[in-house]
Amino acid sequence: MPMLGPDGREADLDTVFVVTPAYNEEQTIREVLVNFRRRAFRHHLVVDDGSWDDTAALARQEGAIVIRHAMNRGLGAALGTGLAAALARGAQVIVTVDADGQHTPEDAFRVIAPVLRGDADFVVGTRLFDSRGMPWHRRLANVIANLLTVLLFGARSTDSQSGLRAFSRSGAERIEIRTDGMEVSSEIVGESRRKGLRCLEIPITSIYTDYSLSKGQSFWTGLRTLRKLLLLKLEGRDR
Amino acid sequence: MRPSQFVLGALVVIALALTVYRFQRRQMKVLDMLFWSALWTAALVGIVFPDTTGFVARLIGIGRGVDAAIYLSVVLVFYLNFRLYMRISQIDTQITTIVRHLALTEREPRAR
């Protein structure tokens, strides 16, 4: 069983795929790719969700595998495509990382470690164990989102909206993503519980910059996500 | 016949004609045609013979015919709105399926 150092040198990362959904992220995508490659993550798959800026070209320059959506379909759609593409390339472990630079390779190691050891099929990197640096309105929004995830999906989570997640191959194969937008985060947490995946939460630190805050869910997109989650429940599409 | 009856009646007749026209041009399915035709015909009967709405109102226990018509319309609008939402969300899912399929089958140029 390989032991993971934070530098990742001892880890076997050959079958680990980093999946990053990106929509107009030319400001940060390069830095994210470089950071992860430096820490020995060899396979980085960027799902360019119909960006009109240079995200795809920059990602290719940095050696990422780029999958392009012909038009913008939303976070959920991009994650679904990313998981499918990584599985098709033989990934044994998949880690999803945001394109805005808020996740560090060190935290990615933390979330994939239990999956590599075979202890878990789905790991969420949760920000709330250490919420320093998280603005109060974000914290409040997270509390509401977690509450809704429990009410609608019956899944308890301390940070249902986290973008840093790790899947084992069988975990990724079993999870079905049906939503297109931001509501996917709650859906994945709910799916993992319903499919009986072995789930874990691992504390991570998030780097909040003005840029990453502008990219996250605002109050209004939060409301839209809430409406979609309610309708998803109403339609029974979450079953 | 009052002017309001005439105007509303004319509008409903146009809607009915459009329904039949679209069905004839195969732009509408049989079930949809039947649904809309029944709806417009009922509206027409209610407009031309307002007393019938009073009968319906008594039947479902609402005082006046006009009130019954408004209540039923609101319920109908909600139902149609929901049906429209379901349809759009279905189309959304289909678009994502197509976009994903195209993305996954596209041959990617590799930089390195």
Image (cartoon, coloured by chain):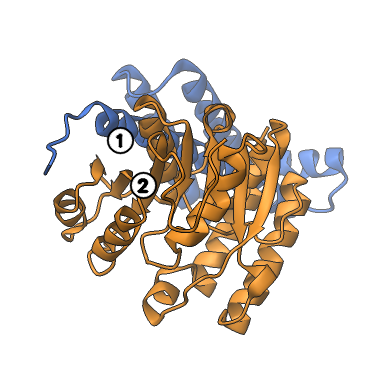
Chain colours: A orange, B blue
Q: Which residue is mark 2?
A: A73
Q: Secondary structure at mark 1?
A: helix
Q: Amino acid at mark 1?
A: Val
Say if mark 1 contacts mark 2, CB within 8 Å. yes
To which chain does the residue with label 1 belong? B
Looking at the image, residue B95 sits to the left or right of residue A96; the answer is: left
The one of A216 and A157 positioned closer to us in this rendering: A157
Q: Quadrant of the C terminus of chain B?
A: top left
List x then y, in percent, for residue B90.
47, 34
Asked if residue A21 is positioned above or below residue B106 in the image, the reply reads: below
Mark 2 chain: A
Residue sitting at 32 percent across and 61 percent down?
A: A35
Residue A73 image offset from top left, x and y in percent: 36, 47
Q: Position of residue A232 (x, y in %)?
A: 62, 44
* Image quadrant where residue B44 sits: top right
Choose between B4 and A229: the one closer to the eye: A229
Residue B23 visible in image: yes
Amino acid type of the residue that numbered disc 2 sits on in the rendered structure: Arg
Q: Answer with the quarter of the image where residue A69 lies.
A: top left
Depicted A173 relative to depicted B14: above or below: above
On the image, the x and y values in percent for residue A237 come to 62, 35
State the residue position of label 1. B99
Tag count: 2
The residue under the point 53% across, 39% down is: A2
Residues at marks 1 and 2 on the same chain: no
